[in-house]
Image (tube, rainbow, N blue to C red):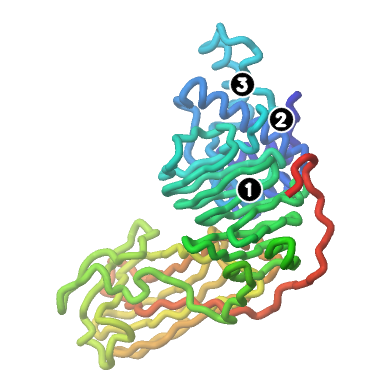
Amino acid sequence: MSTAPSHELDALLSAMLDSPLNADQRRQLSESLASADNLAAYLDWITVHTFLRRQTGAVGVVAERQGFRIQGSEFSFKTAGALAALLLLAAALFYVFLPSTPHSALPTPHSAAPATYAILSDLSNDVAFADADHALGSDLAGPIKLIAGKAQLMFKSTAVVDLTGPCEFAMTGSNRGELHRGSLVAYVPPNARGFSVYAPHDVRIVDLGTRFELSVDRSGQSMLQIFEGRVQLHLGGSATHETHTFGPGLAMRIVDGRLVPLPPAMDLTIAGASFESPRAAERNFVRGMDGWRPITPDFDGGVNRFGSDFDEPIPDGRQLAFINAGAIEQTLDARLAAGVRYTLSVMVGHRPGPNHPDYTIALHAGDELLTSATNPVIPPAGRFASATLSYDCPANQPALGQPLRIVLQSNGSLKTHVQNHFDMVQLRAETISPATLSKTPLPVQHTEGDQP
C-alpha cells in the first residue's frame, strides 16, 4: 500500500518541479524527508518514476534536474512535471501503452528481490561504469565501479551514498558497504543508524545518524570528514582493536590503519589561481581563463600580459586576469566543514589608463553565500593590493558538505572604459575549534539481520 505524502512534502515537491528551490525550501524538504512516512512516500514516487523510465523510455517525462537533495545528499534526482500530474500520467501510460501487462508487473513499493541491497537512485549525465551499464532504478548488490561521473545509491535501510568516479564500491548488506578506492558521501537517517563502511587496513566507519565523506586513495590510505552528527571509527583487527567516537567538523587521515592528524591550516587547491593559462603573447591578451568560468551574460574578460604598465612586478607569474564586465567563478573539490576558518585572498591590480570600477569577491558553499565584500581594498594606480575576507563555519551551517565556490566580479560596464585586474587567488582553511573526541563507544542500533 502506498503512503501519501504530507501536505508540506507535496507542496515542496510541486514547487521543486516548477522551478529550482531556494535555500529555505531545500532545508524544509531535507527536514521533511527525515520523517519515515515522508521518505516512504517519496520512495513510492521513485518506484513509479522508475517504472515509467523502464517501460516507456521516459520520452517526454524526464525534465531537467532541479536543486533537490535527500538531506545531505550531494546531487539531485531526475524529476518530471508536477507530482500529481506524474502519478496521473503513470496510470495513463500503464493502460495506454501496456494493456497486456498484468497488474503484478507494476513494482511494489517497499519490496525488493532477495540478494539485492540498494537501488540506483540517481546518475549524473557524464557517468560511466566499468562493470556494466546500470539503469536508473536498478536493484543492486555486490561491487559497482565508476570510471567517471557520479552515482547515488539508496540502501534498503534508507541510507544514501553518493559515489564520485573513479570509484570502486561494494554493497555487502542492506546497511553496509566497502569502499576500495575513490570517494563517497553518506547520509544516514535515524532508521538507518549503524550504517557501516569498511575501508582497507581494517578500517570500519559506523554511522550514528549523520553525514560524512570518506575517500580512499590508490595506496589504500583513507581520509574521513564528518559534516553532521557522530561516527564511530574502528581501527585494527581483534588483537589491536581501537574504537573512537567523533563529532562534526573533524577531518583526519588514516594511514596504514593509524590516525594521522591533519595540519591545523592548509591552502586549498585552486586551478589557475594565478591565471597563467591560456598563454598570451607579450603586450597582448587572450579571452577566457583556464580553471574559471563566466557566470554572467555580460562577461567580458580573459588574461593579459600588460604587467609593464604597472609600477611594480605582477604578484605571481607573468599574467593577470582582466574583467571589463561580469563575473567568473570556480568550484573547488574542497567542501565546507564546521569549525574551520576560511580566508580568501586575491591580489587586485589597478592598471593605469582604464578606470578602476567597483568589484566584489565572494565565497560560497554550493548555492549558499558565506561571505562577500565589495571594494575591500582599492589599490592606487599602477600598484597591487591584497583583498581579504574570512568566514568561520559553525556546526549548524546548513551548507556543510557543499563544495566551496569562489566568485570574482567586476561591477563595471562595457559602456565605459573600465577594467579590473586579479591575480594570486588563495583560500586557506584553518581549524579553529576541536572536534568532539571520545574513546567510549556509543550504543549502535544495527538493522535486523545485518550486523556489521
Name the N-terminal-most of marks 3 and 1. 3
Residue 411, above or below 237: below
Disc 2/disc 3 C-alpha distance (Å): 21 Å
Quarter holding the N terminus is top right
Neighbourhood count class around disc 1 (C-alpha, 10 Å): few under 14, some 14–19, many 20 upward:
many
How many circles with numbers are drawn on the protein? 3
Instruction: Determine which quarter of the picture holds residue 263.
Output: bottom right
Neighbourhood count class around disc 2 (C-alpha, 10 Å): few under 14, some 14–19, many 20 upward:
few
Q: Nearer the viewer, residue 104 or 301?
A: 104
Secondary-structure class at tag 1: strand
Residue 186, above or below 42: below
Which residue is situated farthest in the top direction here? 100
Residue 59, above or below 265: above
* Disc nearest the viewer among 2 and 3: 2
At x 62%, y 29%, the residue is 47
At x 74%, y 46%, the residue is 192
The residue at which mark 2 appears reads as 110
* Disc nearest the viewer among 3 and 1: 1
The residue at which mark 3 appears reads as 88
Q: Nearer the viewer, residue 167 or 3?
A: 167
Instruction: Determine which quarter of the picture holds residue 301.
Output: bottom left
Q: What's the residue type where badge 1 is placed?
A: Gly
The residue at which mark 1 appears reads as 177
Secondary-structure class at tag 3: helix
Residue 18, above or below 97: below
At x 69%, y 78%, the residue is 433
Q: What's the residue type where badge 3 is placed?
A: Leu
Disc 2/disc 1 C-alpha distance (Å): 21 Å
Q: What's the residue type where badge 2 is placed?
A: His
Q: Position of residue 151 (x, y in %)?
A: 52, 45
Question: Relative to 252, is 40 on the left or the right?
Answer: right
Q: Nearer the viewer, residue 20 or 179?
A: 179
